Amino acid sequence: MKLSRRKFLHVAVSAALPAGMPVAWAQTYPTRSITMVVPAPAGGSTDALARVAVEHKRRQLGQSVIVENVAGADGSIGAGRVARAAPDGYTIVLGIWNTHVANGAVYSLQYDLLTDFEPIALLAGISYLIIAKRAVPAQGLTNFIAWLKANPDKATAATAGIGSAQHVTGILFQKITDTRFQFVPYRGGAPAMQDLIAGHVDWMISTPNDALPQMWLGNVKAYAVMAKTRFASAPEIPTVDEAGLPGFYFSNFGAIWAPRGTPKTVIAKLNAAAVDALADTNARAQLTSLGWEIPRADQQTPEALAALQKAEIERWWPIIKSAGIEAK
């Protein structure tokens, strides 16, 4: 049977799309609101990043983007929900280092971090700080390390939970400085910071949006930024390179993924909306004020996000596994 040109093109394009997905759908997406799952509680730095991003994504997509906070199991519950969602572009996840790197080594996940998601875009990165309670006698990072060595197993380090960024980087800190101290896990960074301010724990590795306000109030002392450059908002804090612990970098990230099998045309539209949001002057100012760093344009592609995730997994999984970190 001979097909007309129009019919032939309709059949050919339909065959290239997932089963049951009409051509008109691919051409008009999105036609309704999109849910962005944020696998963290409302009010934190991850949630703030999501809300700045979606506010500016609405303009290009022409549809509302709804933030839905799904916390629990260090973000694996929310990420798992998106991994199992329909690959139609209407359910995406704002993943971070915990959900899309560490959790694969800490938890027995029912999904694969590398194969069950489609990368969309890296939104921002955030470098951490090494801070301590005011009563710690050491001045400067090298003196702090010496103090830890002089008091093995006596000092306490707060973390946002087992397998969190604070926990894993703390283990690496122990290894490279040859120090020993006790980890105290909390249900997130906020309660950990509260106990640090109260003097119940000695030190922690923290996000700038949690640490800097307390430093400015005089409640904690900051030893170093875990990055190659100082914070523009707090130029008085040296980098780890300057403070005596060269190369001890850590940057968490916020990025967007969709379920595996989401059409490339949809990924392209979502990426374009994210890139547009990151180019907005107001959005950049908001994110910078929260301690987030905007990636270069060449780091905002799906391919760059995939490469970043793979590199982070290769770097951190051996550290997590050798330390025997497992969710109980």
Image (cartoon, rainbow, N blue to C red):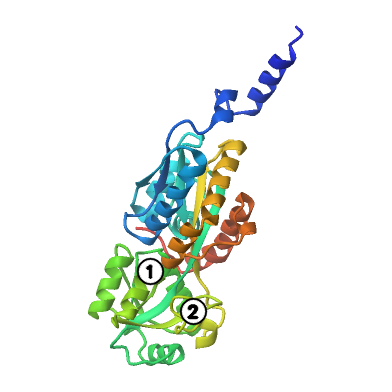
Look at the picture and state if 14 lies above or below 278: above
Q: Distance between the residues labelled 1 and 2?
A: 27 Å
Q: Can residue 114 be seen in this view?
A: no
Mark number displayed over residue 76: none
Q: What amino acid is labelled 2 in the image?
A: Lys
Q: Residue furthest toward the right?
A: 2
Mark 1 lies on residue: 209
Q: Element under label 2?
A: helix
Look at the picture and state if 275 lies above or below 168: above
Mark 2 lies on residue: 175
Q: Is residue 310 visible?
A: yes
Instruction: Give the image location of residue 156, x and y in percent.
Output: 32, 79
Residue at x 60%, y 42% (from the top left corner): 268
- Judge depth for marks 1 and 2 and give the one in front: 1
Count numbered badges in the picture. Answer: 2
Look at the picture and state if 316 lies above or below 304: below
Instruction: Give the image location of residue 262, x and y in percent.
Output: 55, 37
Mark 1: few, some, or many residues within 10 Å (few <14, many ≥20)?
A: some
Instruction: Give the image location of residue 147, x and y in percent.
Output: 38, 91
Residue at x 51%, y 52% (from the top left corner): 277
User: Which quadrant is the N terminus positioned in?
Assistant: top right
Question: Tag 2 or tag 1, which sits nearer the N-term?
Answer: 2
Kindly indicate whether the residue at mark 2 contacts the one at mark 1 (C-beta within 8 angstroms): no
Q: Element under label 1?
A: helix
Look at the picture and state if 303 lies above or below 91: below
Instruction: Give the image location of residue 124, x and y in percent.
Output: 51, 60
